[in-house]
Image: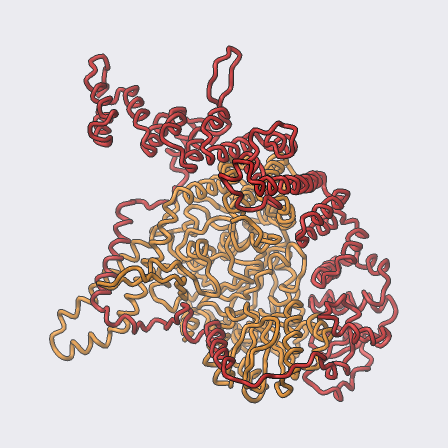
């Protein structure tokens, strides 16, 4: 925390911030224990009845017996059994039967429909656009009941019928005015289903320019249209629409989003490159540029390193084989990777950590944490040490860190640094209490002993004597201090 | 089985029965034996309406999960698809139907759309060339699902995203329809209040729908006195905070889905004497959580810090009850004891489960990580240093903590500062993209559109005013014996619930200024009741308000409303309805693009 120490204490003492812990830790703990004990003792008492719990029957999978999701599995499982029963081989034919569907109207031209195996591509192609009609089919009734199909409904009535799930033809509304009336009534009915139906009709019968223009003054309809284009994955028209509306940032993001679907890294890189000219906001534009630069580099690094690893000549890849490819990893992960495998490279190479830091303007703290973790993982303690070393103008070296030394110790400890290493950094923690608790946690006895000595706290030192090994060097040191007549103990 | 739905002030079992009746009617429409092919998402919500036994009574012999390829063989006359109206599902159905035709021709196909038919979907089926194969295409209007005695949910996960990001109002239409159904069963609600754009829309639609049915008068004595419609974006802060009630924490940590929770099994292993412990179960333990369980109903809404005491009290009662057996001397006494055994065992097993859950949760709430996170949340909510880069967030990013955790905190800081300073905003954005991947530009933009994470536009931060006026932070929140709703977040009183509380007394007129600072209009509407249906209120009789959260509600907010219902002098009982039960994590997830790609 950046707060000064005084602030911090003040902050805790004010009790403004309720720490969410149990008021009375021990008491609360024992309470849970109490109920646990009670449960256990009763369990013993009624153990034989355990299986007859009347609360709820639960199957092996843990789903309550009789629930729908349980039954789905259960009936499906029993079905598998019947599947395994001997049966005569069944003849399958590859020609799909289309007879049932041919009587229907095709609306496929309204969609850039997915064609499954090209089977009905031909089918849709055979129907000319002129025969296409739009209506809401009422399937529960036979076709003969579609008598009122041609009735002369007004736009408002038409919308009402659609809303009630009844049939109504939109075809007969030919003038722009009527079409827009339809749309406006649909919008004021707030029924997304009906709005979409009208929009599909308008999309098919109006030119893009007119449709876009009219939608601009009808925000609700416009949103539904955008949603509809997204659902049907009509990316091209959607991009055109956003451009026409001047929503260029949305358009840019939408296009950028497409990269997620590209698996091949080279194609993805090229696609990202093509995104660079899109009208992003200034900040996003910089991020997309970085994204492209990063992937470009990852491709180069990946190719080189894979080869080096296979060649078997580079020691580090032999000692620490790469667990995964670096492609498409986040920047910080890439930096870690480079600090791990390419730490000492000159700044001119693509994989040099310093170069990456420069190119992507990684903050000092972020760089520091990442390099520290990577070098500690390799147990390269000299590198770790060098990270902290700075010379002042007199030429003295001293340890400096953009992180608190507490965090440094934390990171080192996570990478299983030995006590001698930890000790150096625990010793640099400013706050005495914090230093002692860290030192105790990591068994840096010297630091604890020295700190108590400096505090002239004989009692604590005496108590600590019990925590170090009997006959150890630490114990001797404590004894020496306790016998030292020079020290003026405060207690 | 669903008796717990009828315990409350309003008998929600009526709604459940209506839904079951409609389901039976549809099943009977398809005469003969049937197999149901389920859109897996629907099995959860349907489980709240009906068990398999009901379906079985109506000749449902097999049930499958919808997947592409060929349908499993089943010797039935009807195949019924229970699906949400989604285009991708239509493609799967088409595939099923096509591969089916080659083998059999005698099976009839039906589709039941939940909750609404969709022209878009029917057209997709037509385009795929299978629409003609269906004998029945119907809709099952499952708008509001009774979840508990005082709780209704639409289980409409994407409602917030659709309303506030994509500006798609379909969910609002369903909401209005659901409220019309509710009024048909429980009478016209005479007073409607609302805050927010979506609330305004829903109210408009309801009034319009009522006009369309003007001919038929609802002759049912109104059960609800008031309806309050609240937009989630009026209170973006509350779901971001970590819930500290028992039920809220279960949801935060393990996730409650359609009333069920899956828990790590270790704590539930039954250790019998002499048994080797190597056979620990590996499947997660699944438990149903609702007020049908007496103990759960008692402790769910407590602050977690008060749960230990409640459990140990319960343990003593149960132990004492079991000890009674020593006192049973006569045959009559023994009989009496035995007759109570099943109830006592249920109570014992319930106690065992909740003790285990409480232990699991305690391990987490007492951890340093939980404490640090909560401290930062509380700093933000009290307005401390919200205009600077927060070191804890910075460190958490450096440690690659889960992205959703980071986003929750950053959004919270933004909301509590009425937008972040441009410099701070840019800094977080850069750190997040560098650490978690540039593709999250998309997610960050979504959060910006939703208003959760944004740069400051005006230099005036009105959050402190809102906080003070509505008393959102209470210094002396009492967790054990609460006297204010702020106990649910150990100090923070949820804004949404304060608005509800103030509306009941002294009324919104007292907070006009604050209401203007929050987004969207606030309004009041009245619906005319036919003469003779005006309630004659008994002295001291409570009024009933239905609070509808558009875009989701958290368990802690529900707990706060239940607390208000139980307050002796509140004079108000609350029934809660929502598009979806949410917590900060599920909410943020619903706003992410490609959440599955996030680093764990």
The answer to whether B166 appears left or right of A40 in the picture is: right
* Residue at left offset 35%, top offset 50%: B362
- The quarter holding residue B412 reads top right
Given the current orientation, which residue lies at the most extreme right position? Answer: A175
In this rendered view, identify the residue nearer to me: B550 or A3.
A3
Q: Is residue A81 above or below residue B437?
A: below
- The quarter holding residue A61 reads bottom left
The answer to whether B423 appears left or right of B64 in the picture is: right
Q: Is residue A483 above or below residue B513?
A: above
Q: Is residue B400 above or below residue A208?
A: above
The colour scheme of the drawn protein is by chain
**Chain in red?**
A
Q: Quadrant of the C terminus of chain A?
A: top left
In this rendered view, identify the residue nearer to me: A403 or A296.
A296
In this rendered view, identify the residue nearer to me: A461 or A315.
A315
> How far across and down, in percent of the image, does residue B178 sit?
58, 70
The answer to whether A42 appears left or right of A121 in the picture is: left
* Residue at left offset 72%, top offset 70%: A117
In this rendered view, identify the residue nearer to me: B485 or A474.
A474
> How far across and down, in percent of the image, does residue B397 sit?
53, 40
Given the current orientation, which residue lies at the most extreme left position? Answer: B329
> How far across and down, in percent of the image, does residue A222 sit?
75, 59
Whether residue B228 can be seen here: yes
**Chain in orange?**
B
> How far across and down, in percent of the image, does residue B487 sit?
41, 50
* Residue at left offset 53%, top offset 12%: A393
Question: How many callouts does the rendering have?
Answer: 0
Whether residue B419 can be seen here: no
């Amino acid at each position: 925390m950046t707060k000064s120490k005084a602030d911090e204490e003040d902050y805790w003492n004010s009790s403004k911030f309720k720490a969410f812990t149990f008021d009375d830790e021990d008491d609360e703990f024992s309470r849970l224990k109490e109920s646990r004990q009670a449960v256990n003792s009763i369990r013993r008492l009624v153990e034989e009845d355990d299986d007859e719990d009347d609360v709820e029957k639960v199957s092996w999978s843990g789903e309550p017996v009789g629930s729908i999701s349980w039954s789905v599995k259960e009936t499906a499982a029993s079905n598998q059994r019947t599947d395994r029963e001997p049966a005569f081989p069944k003849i399958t034919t590859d020609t799909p039967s289309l007879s049932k569907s041919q009587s229907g109207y095709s609306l496929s031209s309204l969609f850039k429909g997915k064609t499954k195996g090209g089977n009905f591509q031909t089918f849709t192609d055979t129907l000319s656009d002129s025969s296409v009609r739009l209506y809401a089919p009422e399937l529960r009734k036979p076709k003969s009941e579609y008598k009122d199909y041609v009735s002369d409904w007004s736009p408002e009535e038409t919308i009402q019928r659609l809303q009630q799930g009844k049939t109504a033809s939109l075809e007969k509304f030919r003038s722009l005015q009527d079409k827009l009336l339809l749309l406006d009534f649909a919008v004021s009915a707030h029924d997304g289903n009906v709005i979409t139906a009208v929009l599909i009709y308008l999309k098919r019968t109006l030119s893009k320019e007119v449709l876009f223009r009219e939608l601009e003054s009808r925000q609700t309809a416009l949103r539904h249209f955008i949603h509809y284009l997204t659902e049907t994955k009509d990316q091209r028209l959607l991009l055109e629409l956003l451009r026409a509306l001047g929503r260029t940032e949305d358009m840019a993001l939408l296009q950028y989003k497409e990269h997620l679907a590209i698996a091949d890294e080279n194609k993805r890189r090229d696609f990202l490159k093509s995104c660079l000219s899109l009208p992003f906001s200034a900040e996003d534009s910089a991020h997309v540029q970085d994204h492209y630069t990063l992937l470009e580099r990852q491709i180069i690094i990946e190719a080189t390193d894979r080869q080096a690893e296979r060649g078997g000549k580079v020691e580090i890849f032999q000692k620490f084989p790469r667990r995964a490819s670096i492609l498409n990893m986040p920047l910080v992960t890439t930096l870690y990777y480079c600090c791990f495998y390419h730490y000492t490279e000159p700044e001119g190479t693509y994989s040099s950590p310093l170069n990456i830091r420069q190119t992507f303007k990684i903050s000092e703290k972020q760089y520091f944490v990442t390099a520290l973790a990577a070098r500690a993982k390799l147990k390269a303690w000299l590198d770790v040490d060098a990270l902290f070393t700075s010379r002042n103008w007199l030429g003295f070296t001293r340890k400096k860190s953009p992180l608190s030394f507490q965090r440094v110790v934390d990171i080192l400890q996570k990478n299983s640094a030995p006590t001698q290493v930890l000790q150096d950094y625990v010793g640099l923690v400013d706050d005495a209490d914090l230093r002692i608790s860290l030192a105790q946690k990591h068994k840096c006895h010297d630091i604890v002993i020295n700190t108590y000595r400096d505090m002239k706290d004989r009692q604590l030192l005496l108590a600590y004597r019990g925590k170090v090994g009997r006959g150890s060097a630490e114990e001797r040191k404590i004894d020496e201090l306790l016998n030292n007549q020079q020290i003026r103990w405060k207690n | 089985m669903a008796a717990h739905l009828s315990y409350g002030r309003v008998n929600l079992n009526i709604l459940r029965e209506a839904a079951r009746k409609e389901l039976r009617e549809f099943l009977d429409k398809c005469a003969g034996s049937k197999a149901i092919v389920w859109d897996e998402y629907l099995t959860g919500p349907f489980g709240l309406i009906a068990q398999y036994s009901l379906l079985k009574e109506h000749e449902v012999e097999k049930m499958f999960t919808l997947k592409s390829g060929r349908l499993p063989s089943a010797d039935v006359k009807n195949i019924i698809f229970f699906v949400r109206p989604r285009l991708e599902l239509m493609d799967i159905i088409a595939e099923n139907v096509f591969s089916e035709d080659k083998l059999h021709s005698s099976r009839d196909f039906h589709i039941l759309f939940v909750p609404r038919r969709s022209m878009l979907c029917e057209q997709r089926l037509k385009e795929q060339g299978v629409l003609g194969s269906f004998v029945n295409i119907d809709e099952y209007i499952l708008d509001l699902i009774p979840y508990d005695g005082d709780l209704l949910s639409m289980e409409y996960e994407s409602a917030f995203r659709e309303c506030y990001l994509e500006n798609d109002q379909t969910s609002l239409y369903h909401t209005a329809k659901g409220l019309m159904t509710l009024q048909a069963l429980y009478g016209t609600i005479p007073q409607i209040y609302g805050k927010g754009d979506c609330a305004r829309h829903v109210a408009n639609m309801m009034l319009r729908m009522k006009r369309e049915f003007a001919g038929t008068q609802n002759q049912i004595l109104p059960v609800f006195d008031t309806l309050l419609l609240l937009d989630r974006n009026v209170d973006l802060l509350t779901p971001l905070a970590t819930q500290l009630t028992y039920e809220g924490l279960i949801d935060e940590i393990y996730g409650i889905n359609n009333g069920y929770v899956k828990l790590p099994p270790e704590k539930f292993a039954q250790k019998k004497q002499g048994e080797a412990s190597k056979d620990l179960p590996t499947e997660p333990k699944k438990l149903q959580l609702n007020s049908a369980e007496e103990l759960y109903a008692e402790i769910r809404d407590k602050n977690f810090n008060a749960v230990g005491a409640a459990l140990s009290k319960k343990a003593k009662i149960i132990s004492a009850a079991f000890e009674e057996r020593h006192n049973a001397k006569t045959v009559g006494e023994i009989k009496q004891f035995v007759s109570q055994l099943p109830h006592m065992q249920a109570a014992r097993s319930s106690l065992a489960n909740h003790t285990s859950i409480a232990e699991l949760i305690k391990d987490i709430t007492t951890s340093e990580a939980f404490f640090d996170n909560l401290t930062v949340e509380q700093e933000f909510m009290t307005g401390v240093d919200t205009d600077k880069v927060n070191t804890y967030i910075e460190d958490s990013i450096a440690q690659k903590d889960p992205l959703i955790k980071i986003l929750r905190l950053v959004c919270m800081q933004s909301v509590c500062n009425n937008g972040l300073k441009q410099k701070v905003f840019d800094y977080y954005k850069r750190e997040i993209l560098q650490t978690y991947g540039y593709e999250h530009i998309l997610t960050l933009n979504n959060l910006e559109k939703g208003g959760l994470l944004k740069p400051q536009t005006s230099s005036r931060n009105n959050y402190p005013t809102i906080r003070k006026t509505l008393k959102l932070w209470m210094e002396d929140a009492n967790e054990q014996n609460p006297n204010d709703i702020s106990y649910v977040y150990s100090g923070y009183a949820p804004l949404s619930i304060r608005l509800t509380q103030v509306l009941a007394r002294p009324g919104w007129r007292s907070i006009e200024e604050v209401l203007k600072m929050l987004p969207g209009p606030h309004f009041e509407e009245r619906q005319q009741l036919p003469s003779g249906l005006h309630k004659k209120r008994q002295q001291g009789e409570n009024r009933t308000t239905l609070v509808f959260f558009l875009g989701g509600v958290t368990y802690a907010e529900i707990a706060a409303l239940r607390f208000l219902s139980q307050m002796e002098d509140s004079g108000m009982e609350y029934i809660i309805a929502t598009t979806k039960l949410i917590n900060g994590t599920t909410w943020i997830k619903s706003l992410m693009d490609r959440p599955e790609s996030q680093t764990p």
